[in-house]
Amino acid sequence: MKLQNRTFIVTGATSGMGRAIALEFSKEGAKLILSGRNEEAAEKLLKLLKTEAYFLAGDVSDPAYNQRLVELALDKFGKLDGLVTNAGMLGLGSITELEIEKWTKTLDVNLTSVFYLLKSALPYLENSNYGSVVINSSIAAFKSFPNHPSYCASKAGLVALSKQAAVDYAPKVRINCICPGPVDTPFIHASAAAFPDPATAVENAGKNTLVQRLGEPEDIAKLALFLASEDASWITGGVYTIDGGIMAKG
């Protein structure tokens, strides 16, 4: 029970990596405030969780919604100990093809939303005597993919934001960033549409890892758990690729 009596907000919690993280954190004792858009998926998830949890539907690109997530944690649990940010969108298309509105929305959802949530949450995290933040970025922060300009830019921004925030809020709050490679979620299948041969892009992504498979959402959840827990009490400002070895290949 590595997160016993800890309260976390998890964004993007209704599918993929965020859902796996919510399940893993609940198994380890965390009380949860879950964020997402899909209320039906949220209802199903809440039934699986082993600890007290609440869901608030909304748009993470809205600063007021992020404030409400923090307020809900304080109202239900009286404190806030940590965050795990997973909400994201792709915004596919080359620079000349990508609509300005989609560029802006992708950065708002992927990057600026994390700033909003940190801004609302950090005063309470500083007072928790535990504060821990895990920001979910991507190897797209370092490795370019065709027709993903807004996605790559936003994920690189998350890496920089996590490191900068770690400097400002140490030692009271630890802030770390994880950068997954290809993980078997609906997101990677949507991403495949940007490649010349979408039908084989996902299969090739798994084959291109050193371990010859796609990641599973549970793989990411275990790393997030480690970084969020006291097992990582001397770790902050870190950026961790979890990609089956893709980045090792250059």
Image (cartoon, rainbow, N blue to C red):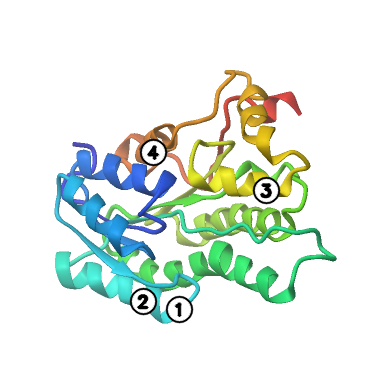
Depth order, front residue of 99/143: 99
Answer whether residue 81 is visible to the viewer in this image: no
Circle 1 — which element? helix
Which mark is on residue 221?
4
Query: Quick one: quadrant of the N terminus?
Result: top left
Which mark is on residue 193?
3
**How many residues crowd mark 2 within 10 Å: few (<14), some (14–19), many (20+)?**
some
The residue tagged 2 is 67
Q: Residue at x 57, y 43 (%)?
A: 188
Label 3 to label 4, Cα distance in Å?
26 Å
**How many residues crowd mark 1 within 10 Å: few (<14), some (14–19), many (20+)?**
some
Q: Position of residue 52 (x, y in %)?
A: 14, 55
> Up-down: is 43 above or below 65?
above
- Which amino acid is tagged 4? Ala
The residue tagged 1 is 63
Instruction: Name which of mark 1 and mark 3 comes first in the sequence.
Output: 1
Label 2 to label 1, Cα distance in Å?
6 Å
Q: Position of residue 87 (x, y in %)?
A: 47, 58
Query: Quick one: quadrant of the C terminus?
Result: top right
Q: Is residue 136 left or right of residue 48?
A: right
Circle 4 — which element? helix
